[in-house]
Amino acid sequence: MLGGDGRDNGEGGALRNGTDENGEGRAGLLQVQGLAKSVPGGRRLFAGLDLAVGAGEVVAIVGESGVGKSTLLNILAGLDRADEGEVRVEGRALGSLDEAALTRLRRERIGFVFQAFHILPYLTLRQNVALPLALVKAKRDAIDRRAGEMLAHVGLHGRDEGYARDLSGGELQRVAIARALVHRPALILADEPTGNLDPDTAGTVLHLLARTVRGGGAAAVIVTHSQATAAMADRVLRLTAGGLEASDAR
Ligand SMILES: Nc1ncnc2c1ncn2[C@@H]1O[C@H](COP(=O)(O)OP(=O)(O)O)[C@@H](O)[C@H]1O
Ligand SMILES: [Mg+2]
């Protein structure tokens, strides 16, 4: 299980929870200031965007289609660069990191859940969940054990050797969550993670995600259209051209 102390294995840095080397506390695990981004054609998506998310906090972001929610998440993950402003993850400014350092930060400290799952059908569930650990070169038996733990945590106990191609949408998204959290990321970013699920399944998946985030002391930013997400979030913010504002969508 992720949760409790969340640092049980002593298998090396790749599997251990992060500590705050910058002495800034975990209160501002994610800090965003003055972010601005235009699309390549020149149209401005947002400007002056500020956001702070603390450890154990779940923030939901809502907003019209095309307003820039996915772009924002990609910037927070270091997959895209802002035109102005700064993103800090555990005190480290993404803009100050080169591509290699960004990749390392992403692999070790960030977990991403996509709407379209991106689970590989011809791999087993264990192989899918283990992928992030393989990227950070953890030891084989530690990887397998941890992947099994995460599958159990999302209600897929003992299904390790089953193939992803045989799963329902709700099960696939649970595997995607297990994969996003398997390396104990500090920051979890989810882009409409329940967009393809029926409302009941979406509720189950979101509760699982929120419980894991809170139990593990991570921070989560979840883009969503779902009422269920808004209901379980600590805060709901609306993305507009002027940045993020408090939303009454809950
Ligand atoms: N690489 C790109 N080139 C041009 N326009 C883009 C690119 N990526 C995104 N856009 C545009 O930026 C806007 C915001 O996209 P997106 O972040 O996906 O919005 P959302 O997730 O809120 O629906 C959209 O109008 C989209 O067409
Ligand atoms: Mg989007």
Image: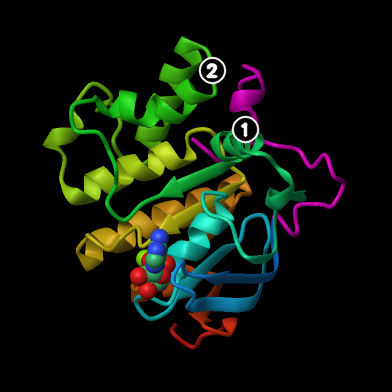
Callout 1 secondary element = helix
Residue lying farthest left?
166
Amino acid under disc 1: Ala
Indicate whether residue 182 is drawn in magenta: no
Residue visible at 62% across and 45% down? 186
What label does residue 136 carry, if any? none
In the rendered structure, the answer to whether residue 96 lies left or right of residue 24 reads left
Across and down, in percent, residue 21 comes to: 82, 39
Q: Is residue 125 visible?
A: yes
Span colored in magenta: 1-29
Q: Label 2, on which residue? A: 138
Across and down, in percent, residue 144 comes to: 41, 18
Across and down, in percent, residue 75 comes to: 55, 57
Q: Label 1, on which residue? A: 100
Quick one: label 1, few (<14), some, or many (20+) residues within 10 Å? few
Query: Which sits earlier in the primary sequence, circle 1 or circle 2?
Result: 1
Q: Nearer the viewer, residue 198 or 239?
A: 239
Quick one: label 2, few (<14), some, or many (20+) residues within 10 Å? some
Q: 22 above or below 165? A: below
Whole-number angstrom distance, CA of label 1 to CA of label 2: 18 Å
